[in-house]
Amino acid sequence: MSLFVNQNEKILGTFGCGTVTNKRVYMSGKCVFRSGSGYFSCQQEHILDLKDVTGTCFEYYSRPLRLVVATLLFLVSVFLLAFSKNNESMLYAGITTIILAVAFLIGYILSRKTIMRIDYAGGNIGLQLDTFGKEPASEFMKTIRMAKDAITGYQKL
């Protein structure tokens, strides 16, 4: 049994869990999808006809609320430390809020993600680029667009 729908398909490019042929895009493995305001990962198998692909993009995802909380905690800690000259409890509170601010800042930095997304009629599918890198993903996206151009007869003006 073959991976491909049609035995005459030719592989044009691969990246992570994705393969582009002259007719389809195959995605199999850990992929991400957008639902509401967040991304969720799961094991998926997708076969997308190139004619149904509507676009590709990089999407940068983060949780800015963590950065806002870190900034507010830092400001509170500056206030507490400025007025803690003779008050030991305010000094400890200021140090504690600095530690919390750093924890929220680290949480913000770790929550940032770059997603390579393929949009198609009916939804989208993505691949998180933590381990793959952006340059190979960019080449994979170009391959998808060139294959789509070839089957739709699109020509540069």
Image: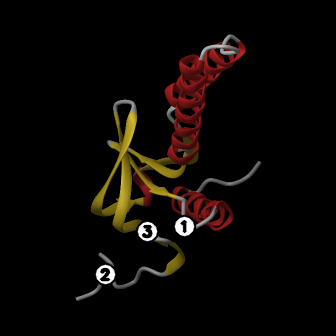
Q: Earlier in the sequence, mark 2 or mark 3?
A: 2
Disc 2 residue crowd, few under 14, some 14–19, many 20+, Cα 10 Å:
few
In the rendered structure, which amino acid carries the disc numbered 2?
Leu
Residue depicted at 57% across the width and 47% down the height: 57
Q: Earlier in the sequence, mark 2 or mark 1?
A: 2
Residue depicted at 34% across the width and 31% down the height: 36
The answer to which quarter of the image holds residue 79 is: top right
Q: Earlier in the sequence, mark 1 or mark 3?
A: 3
The answer to which quarter of the image holds residue 18 is: bottom left
- Per the image, the residue denoted by label 2 is 3
In the rendered structure, which amino acid carries the disc numbered 3?
Lys
Horizontal side of residue 121 vs 73, given as left or right: left
Q: Is residue 102 above or below residue 70?
A: below
- Residue at the farthest bottom position: 1
* Helix, strand or loop status at disc 2: loop
Comparing 141 with 127, the one in front is 127
Residue depicted at 59% across the width and 65% down the height: 140
Position of the N terminus by quadrant: bottom left
* Helix, strand or loop status at disc 3: loop
Image depth: mark 2 or mark 1 in front: 1
Do callouts 2 and 3 mark residues in contact (Cβ within 8 Å)? no
- Per the image, the residue denoted by label 1 is 131
Measured Cα–Cα span from mark 2 to mark 3: 13 Å
Query: What is the x, y in percent for residue 148?
Result: 53, 59
- Per the image, the residue denoted by label 3 is 23
Q: How is the image coloured?
A: secondary structure
In the rendered structure, which amino acid carries the disc numbered 1?
Thr
Query: What is the x, y in percent for residue 9?
Result: 42, 79
Number of dots carrying numbers: 3
Disc 1 residue crowd, few under 14, some 14–19, many 20+, Cα 10 Å:
few
Image depth: mark 2 or mark 3 in front: 2
